[in-house]
Amino acid sequence: MSASESSSQPESITEPYEWIRDTGPLAGSLARPLVYAFEHITLPDALFTRHPELISALIPDEQSGMAFLHMWSKSFGVCQSHGMFKPGSASHTRLEIAYIRSMLGSVSCRKVIYGEFAISVLRTPQPRVGGETYYVALCRRLDDNAAYDGTLSPSSRYFTFEAFDLKEHAYFCEWDHGRTHSNMGMFPILSEQQFLELVCSRLPSGNLPTKLETPVFG
């Protein structure tokens, strides 16, 4: 590698994808656009449009790791197409792969059946800025047997537990297929099981699972 090539390489795998903003109203705060895109754009979009790889991963007892690796990769495309990465940063394929793997290593997925819904609860990367999530829940009706062709699935539900002060409180929210969300209140930091119970309280009644199953990955 030449000196010029070496000097163009970021100092770490996070540098192109995480940085401290130095201008604008959010100056001084951390930017992690890939995490935001994964939690608030890629996952709900894939759920509501019946993305075949994601939907297959939501089937109870199925392994999910590769599908969520694909969702992280799709999030890269979202960030690149919207110019969300650090201004002036170059694309480094090896770093992209390493960064995605580091993020995926922070994710676990547990699944339960509740009434008419199959629920997948994801523990997401530990939030480091307000708006990032502790958990998300992807809820899909068991009788939603429509073709996985990108058509809208209006019966699916997507819930998030979003950091507020990174210490004691978080918001419980639901996002719809139009990427708008409803804030349903602030809560103390909950366990995965408590988050599941909160999600179930927003769905048609069923037999509340006594606990989440062993992670299918993570």
Image (cartoon, grey):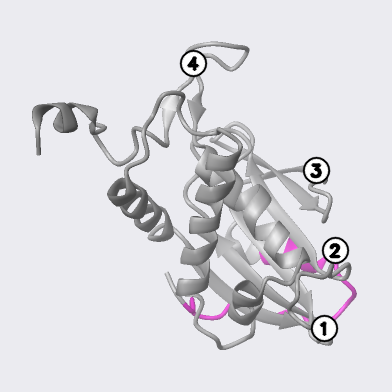
Looking at the image, do the residues carrying marks 4 and 1 touch, with CB atoms under 8 Å apart? no
- Which residue is drawn at the image coordinates 72% and 83% (left, top)? 113
Q: Amino acid at mark 2?
A: Arg
Main SS of the magenta segment?
loop
Could you say which disc has been placed on residue 146 in the image? 1
- The part of the image, by quadrant, that contains residue 51 is bottom right
- Which residue is drawn at the image coordinates 34% and 38% (left, top)? 14
Q: Is residue 204 left or right of residue 52?
A: right
Q: Which residue is mark 2?
A: 202
Gap between marks 3 and 1 measured at Cα: 33 Å
Gap between marks 4 and 1 measured at Cα: 46 Å
Judging from the image, what secondary structure is the residue with disc 2 in?
A: loop
Q: Which residue is mark 3?
A: 185
Chain-order first, disc 4 or disc 2: 4
Nearest the viewer among 151 and 102 is 151
Q: Which residue is mark 4?
A: 28
Marks 3, 1: nearer the viewer: 1
